[in-house]
Amino acid sequence: MMEPSVKSEYFDLLRFETVGADPNRLRDCVNCATWLRRWLEAIGFTSELLMPPVADGKAAPPVLFAERKGDEGSHTVLVYGHYDVQPADPVDEWKTPPFEPTEKDGRVYCRGSQDDKGQSFAFLCGVRDFLASAKPGHIPTIKVVLEGQEESGSAALIAMAPDLRRKIAADLLLVCDTSAAADLRPAIVAGLRGVSHFTVRLDGPNRDLHSGEYGGIAPNPAQAIAELVASLHNPDGSISVAGFRDGVEPPTEPERRAAEAAALSDNDYYNDIGCEPVGGQQGKTVTQRNSFEPTIEVNGIHSGYGGPGAKTVIPSSAFAKISMRLVPGQTPRGVIAAVKRHLEDKCPRGMKLTVEEVNEGAPGFRLPLASPAFRLAASVLEEMDPRGPVFQWDGASIPVVSVLKTASGAAPLIVGWGQPEDRIHSPNESYSFRQFDRAREWARKILEAL
């Protein structure tokens, strides 16, 4: 059971409103990073806050780097996590205050309770446990990188990474920001999709127009944006953008079999999301669509009047937020260029199209199943759970992991303890004490195994 002192630390961390994408929360991010810096220094780390350069007149949240030297000749481990969180919106759907941790039925409800403050802090508590009990001569060098922009693309850390090569050089990259299998069975993530996103804007009339006086005359941006985003997919759910799939590397047969063996059923997804899992291309399994296929998703469409009652206007503009998940073989720059060409070619008449807020993000990657790091992890996880681990190819993205992998030279080992009921990115996010304890135990045991 979590000690009162650890619970107090955990709750203090959660109270920082670290929405890294919101410039108004920069001070919260700096205060949180400072809190984490002091916490790490208290257990023997030296640390520094790396301030990213100002871009487009906007300052970015700091990157925290910390290091604790190990015994001579020991391995070097790089631990990555992020302290930023998703916005709380829609706030009125929260049953508890989104930034005041609330304990109920063995779970902590708060934004960031799982993603990723809860998971990364649990892992760091496991690091502290290890250091308190480790025998001299058996302690690796441990480096920690914690950033404040993961939820919005990690732009600052990605830009800084090439200059940090020597500082972050390591043998093993440990990440605790993913999910376990059903009923908390351990899962080793053998691949992640990359992610890119942008905003597409359509401008039509020079002002909102009376829909009676100008209906049937003026082009309608709200209708046009719907037509435009609908053109991104074919009727069977496949992506219609020419060149988008160029270079896609299909999974190997062993990867496909391992992924299907750990897959949830369609009924599991129905119970989780409340509707049938019919998104994506027809004729492919849920696992194929989520683990090995790229996607284009519309994250939001905004135009015109949305208040109570009616306001009979033709809006002057509309925009859509679009994200893409990438698989190995695709490049962020290549897919963005392909989608931009498609949108320009399909732009409805009478509209001016602008693509803005472009974030290239990072590519996806898959790791060899024969990795020595996987063998080490499997032995540790079998000790923790007699069912042993499964392998997963996560449909989500941690964009900076592939960048850190290259810059540090470290082999990634991604093991997390999330579950669907955590509701990350949604109102009423939570994390159970059982999951926290598992993440903490995993950190201690993998460091002992090294």
Image (tube, rainbow, N blue to C red):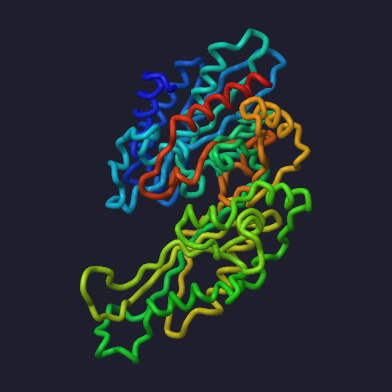
Q: Position of residue 398 (x, y in %)?
A: 56, 45
Tell me: residue 227, above or below residue 104: below
Residue placed most toward the observer, 291 or 438: 438
Q: Position of residue 162 (x, y in %)?
A: 62, 40
Classify residue 44 as left or right of residue 371.
left
- Image quadrant for the C terminus? top right
Residue found 71% across the figure and 32% down from its top: 373
Residue found 75% across the figure and 36% down from its top: 371
Q: Residue furthest front?
A: 267
Residue placed most toward the observer, 296 or 404: 296
Residue placed most toward the observer, 88 or 203: 88
Q: Position of residue 56 (x, y in %)?
A: 42, 52
Q: Position of residue 55 (x, y in %)?
A: 45, 48
Residue found 54% across the figure and 36% down from its top: 417
Q: Residue 16 is drawn in which quadrant?
A: top left
Q: Residue furthest top?
A: 136
Instruction: Count all numbered tags in the image, as a single digit.
Output: 0
Residue found 69% across the figure and 54% down from its top: 328
Tell me: residue 422, above or below residue 320: above
Q: Residue furthest left?
A: 309
Residue placed most toward the observer, 382 or 397: 382
- Image quadrant for the N terminus? top left
Classify residue 113 as left or right of residue 249.
left
